[in-house]
Image (cartoon, rainbow, N blue to C red):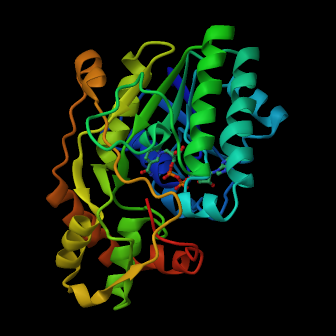
């Protein structure tokens, strides 16, 4: 009999599947059973869960977090909820925001309402540094005013506020993480790093937005997963935890790393018209999670990126079918 049951929404996507594979993998705690609830949008991929699909403590439910009846049943059956499900690609939110508002805002509200009926021990809401918007200098702490730029970030910011309201109003044990950009294997090839890698491996030109001087902090997916588990196990109810500490660099510098790792030159890059409302710089102060929970980013960027490129080299069968679906654009 497993001691802890976790409902993982969006567990067939990039970050959620990494979380599930980690929990049920050889280094996992061993006393946990996991149910993934995923709608299987274009970003959901059962191949991401192939490693765990026959695991005795794994269950997959195809469904929508906006489904009241289904979420009520599933939340009632589990000790914890870790909520990843979202529309996640900024460029898609610029083309059309409806799905972002529906899933990220209404879907989160539906899950939280289900949790009021049968409160889980914890409800971890996985959010993003993009809710703070662009910051010219300094670092955002958790009490920084929210100033999202894209419809994606605005929908995530709204979901954060709703989650906090359920904590304050209903006493739900809600904990929020706000992480910087992740990189690693199994990331859908519409996002900047896998888009560059898969394009360069195919000998294509890859696009760089604007002047390429936008600054992002890149954190290996393992470090994000570690932070989420620290927050679920030892965080405090109603608290927000920034998760950062990767490597801050401009998109030009990132492109340089990727070109070198893929054995390509600058002639493979073409400058593209800048994204509308493109945030210039994200930067997090993550001293709270360090101080309170002992979080430290462990993965070195150069090594992590080399391993990521190697994974895409060796796993064409995973990404080639996805490239056709990744037609909207290429940004984190
Ligand atoms: P993703 O797009 O790879 O995966 C999202 C998953 O959610 C997919 O499997 C999709 O099928 C599922 N989904 C979408 N709508 C759904 C719905 N209505 N009901 C059920 N499932 C649904 O995204 P990701 O990069 O894995 O991001 C996961 C979460 O982490 C998001 O909430 C995102 O805001 C957050 N986050 C991601 C990053 C990053 O760099 N990737 C950084 C910080 C925070």
Quadrant of res 199? bottom left
* Residue at x-position 46% and y-position 76%: 273
Horizontal relation, residue 141 to residue 45: left or right: left
Which residue is drawn at the image coordinates 77% and 40% (left, top)?
66
**Above or below, comparing residue 278 to residue 107 in the picture:** below
Residue 172: where, in percent of width, then height? 62, 13
Quarter holding the C terminus is bottom left
Q: Name the spot of residue 62 as percent of width and height, x first.
A: 71, 50
- On the image, the x and y values in percent for residue 161 come to 60, 26
Q: Quadrant of residue 200?
A: bottom left
Quarter residue 197 falls in: bottom left
Total marks placed: 0
- Name the residue: 30% across, 88% down: 268
In the image: residue 126, left or right of residue 312: right
Return the x and y of residue 141 as percentages of the image width and height. 35, 26
Between 138 and 118, the residue placed more toward the observer is 138
Q: Nearer the viewer, residue 161 or 52?
A: 161
Query: Can the viewer see residue 324 in this picture?
Result: yes
Horizontally, is 180 left or right of 297 in the view?
Answer: right
Classify residue 294 as left or right of residue 152.
Answer: left
The foreground one among 208 and 53 is 208
Q: Can the viewer see residue 36 in this picture?
A: no
Q: Residue furthest front?
A: 136
325 vs 219: above or below: below
Q: Residue furthest right?
A: 69
């Amino acid at each position: 009999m497993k001691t802890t049951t976790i409902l993982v929404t969006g567990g067939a996507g990039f970050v959620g599947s990494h979380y599930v594979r980690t929990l049920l993998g050889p280094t996992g705690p061993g006393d946990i059973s996991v149910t993934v609830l995923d709608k299987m949008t274009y970003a959901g991929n059962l191949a991401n869960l192939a490693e765990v699909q026959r695991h005795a403590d794994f269950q997959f439910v195809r469904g929508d977090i906006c489904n009241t009846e289904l979420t009520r049943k599933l939340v009632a059956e589990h000790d914890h909820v870790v909520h990843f499900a979202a529309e996640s690609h900024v460029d898609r939110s610029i083309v059309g925001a409806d799905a972002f508002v529906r899933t990220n805002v209404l879907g989160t509200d539906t899950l939280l309402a289900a949790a009021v009926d049968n409160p889980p021990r914890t409800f971890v809401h996985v959010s993003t540094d993009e809710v703070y918007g662009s910051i010219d200098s300094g670092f955002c702490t958790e009490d920084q005013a929210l100033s999202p730029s894209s419809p994606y970030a605005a929908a995530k910011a709204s979901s954060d506020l709703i989650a906090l309201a359920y904590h304050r109003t209903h006493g739900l044990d809600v904990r929020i993480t706000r992480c910087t950009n992740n990189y690693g294997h199994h990331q859908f090839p519409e996002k900047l790093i896998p888009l560059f890698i898969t394009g360069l491996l195919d000998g294509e030109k890859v696009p760089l937005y604007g002047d390429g001087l936008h600054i992002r902090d890149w954190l290996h997916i393992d470090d994000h997963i570690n932070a989420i588990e620290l927050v679920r196990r030892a965080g405090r109810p109603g608290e927000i935890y920034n998760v950062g500490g990767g490597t801050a660099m401009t998109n030009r510098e990132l492109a340089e790393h990727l070109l070198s790792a893929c054995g390509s030159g600058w002639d493979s890059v073409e400058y593209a018209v800048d994204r509308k409302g493109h945030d210039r710089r994200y930067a997090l102060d993550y001293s709270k999670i360090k101080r309170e929970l002992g979080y430290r980013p462990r993965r070195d960027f150069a090594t992590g990126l080399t391993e990521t490129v190697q994974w895409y080299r060796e796993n064409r069968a995973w990404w080639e079918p996805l490239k056709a679906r990744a037609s909207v654009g290429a940004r984190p």
